[in-house]
Amino acid sequence: MWINGPNFLLKDESDWPEQLDRKEGSLLNDPEVKNKVTVNTIKVCEDMEPMNELINYHSSWHKLKRSVAWILKVKETLWKLKEERKELSRAISQTEKDPDKQKLKLEQHMKKVKGTIGKKSLTLDDLVTAESEIIQFSQKQQFGEDIKILQKGRQLGRSSQLFKLDPVLQDSTLRVGGRLNKSAMPENAKHPAILSKHSGVVTLILRDIHQRTGHCGHSYVLAQLRRKYWIPQANSAIRKIISKCTTCRRINGKVGEQKMACLPEDRLLPDKPPFTNTGVDFFGPFNVKRGRGTVKRYGVMFTCLTLRAVHIEVADSLDTDSCINAIRRFISRRGQVTIMRSDNGTHFVSSERELREAIQQLDNGKIERDLQPKGIKWIFNSPAASHQGGVWERQIRTVRRILNSLLKEQAANDDCLHTIMCEVESIINGRPLTSVSDDVNDVEPLTPNHLLLLRCQPSMPPGIFSKDDTHTRRRWKQVQYLVDLFWTRWTREYLPLLQERQKWLKPRRNFTTGDVVLLVDSSSPRNSWLMGKVVETLPDASGTVRRVKIKTRTSTLERPVNKLCLLEEAITEE
């Protein structure tokens, strides 16, 4: 039996024995039989009330009042139709004995009545009545216990949050009693209706006031609110509404930022030759005399990322070949470069429109392909992220200031321009990297020239050497000693100065996929900035998002977070 089962299974199902009722007494105490319990439950959801659904559905206070007004109007109309039908039916039955004729006359008359009612529109009184109904509904939800106490003619206890307002009931509406009964203020201002900041109605009212007042600030919105309503702890509710206002964010929203990143490795490692890790940028143009006319020349500045030394070349134009030739001259004079950093080719930051337009024509791919056989890794910063090239951007500003004082708005020839560039280079490389001491006994401050020239300035007289120093090996050891001394001082005196963050001190919220943002454009007014949606985040090694890809209505762009203004956060599924 345990293998094949009972014999009745081999028969037709109609011949099977009847199943025993589990309620029979013989099975009630059987330990092998599980008891079956049926439970009927009813879940009551208070949020399913029609008024709550209307409040959650609408995003406008005026539209909510109109919807409620129409519902009340339809309700009133149906009630009137019902009463009128009763009276008309009673009148017709007295004059007409035939039931069919009674029904026909009744239907004809009711059609006329319905046609007249359907043409009516909302009046101001309808909207006022609807507003009262909404306010009273919200008050019953939030202050139901307080209203019951007042309806009994008793005073509220000290534990009530409305105790200090001395609330009263006027026409079933909970209002502030207060101390301004004898003032000349309007009645609604003396006894405003009380609402809770947690009510959805308050959100609609505050949003409506904020929009009607031209997106004014917190104080003005609060003053307008108190003319009709009183909300305990209204300040926090108003700030919440203003902080979520898309229009205010578009006009006044802060630009995104993130905690300042750690310095890259190529700026911190000593004991490498100068310009091993280099940043490059262009500046200009400069008008140069050539015959009877003038031509434009451009400066190419190479900045050592470790030493902060600079090397300046002059380019005849801004085509790709001139850029490559300037880099080749630089490498021939300063030695091999391992890493070359620059701004993105189509987004160099410059105050000169001509320079910006010319740089857009550079073939970055050709430049990179030409440098790869030389063992140079070219790293482009994020588009529009000028702060990532702050090392050379700051040096370019210094170069501009010195050039303006030397040229004095005069057009020089090519030879003069090359000479001036060399002088500017020497001045910048002689600037101290560390603070200058007032003590005459202290060593002179560290400068890039201490490693490039083994002395502070190129114009210094030669040192005094002994006769034994003429030997080549002895001189080489002396140079090595001076270089080691420089890097020791660089590590001890200059490197600690880079420890502190000057701004962007705290970590911020990471931009996420789905965020709606504005693209910062300093060349156009804020109300015309492009709007986009974040489609991809590009976090760094620590997981911090510093770059994102944004889809606009025409293209997909890559931008740093400090060139974005958050409008709406992405909706996350909880």
Image: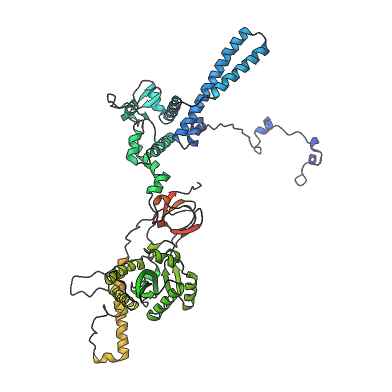
User: Could one spot residue 418 in this view of the protein?
Assistant: yes
The quadrant of the rendering that contains the N terminus is: top right
Residue 216 or residue 305, whichever sits in front: 216
- Residue 116 found in image quarter: top right
* Number of callouts: 0
Determine the residue located farthest toward the right in the rendered image.
Answer: 11
Residue 214 or residue 192, whichever sits in front: 214
Residue 490, horizontal then vertical, whole percent:
30, 73
Residue 18, horizontal then vertical, whole percent:
75, 33
User: Could one spot residue 349 in this view of the protein?
Assistant: no
Q: How is the image coloured?
A: rainbow
- At 39% across and 72% down in the image, what residue appears? 278
Q: In the rendered view, would you say 218 is above or below 25?
A: below
- Residue 218 found in image quarter: top left
* 470 lies left or right of 513: left
- Residue 34 found in image quarter: top right
* 62 lies left or right of 85: left
Residue 197 or residue 562, whichever sits in front: 562
- At 31% across and 86% down in the image, what residue appears? 477
- At 46% across and 77% down in the image, what residue appears? 375
* 329 lies left or right of 573: left
Q: In the rendered view, would you say 112 is above or below 395?
A: above
Residue 492, horizontal then vertical, whole percent:
29, 71
Residue 188, horizontal then vertical, whole percent:
35, 27
- At 33% across and 79% down in the image, what residue appears? 415
